[in-house]
Image: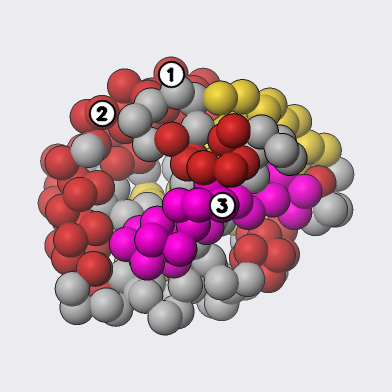
Amino acid sequence: MSNEFKNNTILGPINSWILKILSGYMDYLFGKSKRALFREHPKTVVEIGPGAGANMRYLRKGTKLIAIEPNIHMHANLKKSADAHGIHLEIKTLTGESIDLPNNSCDFVVSTLVLCTVRHPEKCVAQIKRILKPSGVFVFIEHVKADENSILALIQNLMHRPWHWFFEGCHTNRDIKGILELAGFSTLTLEKYNAYSPFVPIIPQIRGRATK
């Protein structure tokens, strides 16, 4: 999440509440993909920007989750979700660009609909790659920039400024696919698709996994 929005005393609580009430709908939209991506995850998982904890339902009971979550207004709901799902939670109030975990220390990192919000996504992806062990896995679902000159691209550009403000720094038209392709992972499996929903600016999406 962008530093300029992470502790916003108005939007922070509002977005935490929105994410909590949309948890069921987001499971309807993304549950099948997340279950496939998170399958056979290790005992410790690092998640970049877990928000209110929507992804905990896809983790096995007893999993340790290291949550990189700079928005302090998300922390109460994160703790409630951890208690509900039997997750051992460690919260780090850090941005994705400044993760304090050691080099080559993590087996599994998760990011879902988060790289759109960080101020420097290339740095965030570099941090993810840095903390992964050799052969460690990064799994992701992200919304991305639509194809040039498409109706979706026009909508993304028109909606960008209000969307960016209300959703705490979210970019509707960021080329996250290109960023991941240039990050230097040893393998990258990536699928681009449209996830149709009322949230039109984030219909173009990617999902997949990268191996260090």
* Residue with the mark numbered 1: 32
Residue interval drawn in magenta: 156-180
**Residue type highlighted by circle 2:** Tyr
* Residue with the mark numbered 3: 157
Q: Quadrant of the N terminus?
A: bottom left
**Residue type highlighted by circle 3:** Asn
Say which of marks 2 and 1 sits in front.
2
Task: Tell me residue 33's x, y (percent).
Answer: 49, 23
Q: Quadrant of residue 28?
A: top left
Q: Is residue 166 magenta?
A: yes
Q: Going from the N terminus, do you reach mark 1 or mark 3 first? A: 1
Label number found at residue 167: none
* Residue with the mark numbered 2: 25
Task: Tell me residue 69's x, y (percent).
Answer: 38, 65
Q: Give the left or right position of residue 162, taking residue 45 as reference.
A: left
**Residue type highlighted by circle 1:** Lys
Q: Judge whether 130 appears above or below 193 on screen.
A: below
Q: Going from the N terminus, do you reach mark 2 or mark 1 first? A: 2
Identify the secondary structure beneath mark 1.
helix
Q: Residue at x 53, y 46 (%)?
A: 156
Q: Give the left or right position of residue 19, taking residue 143 as reference.
A: left
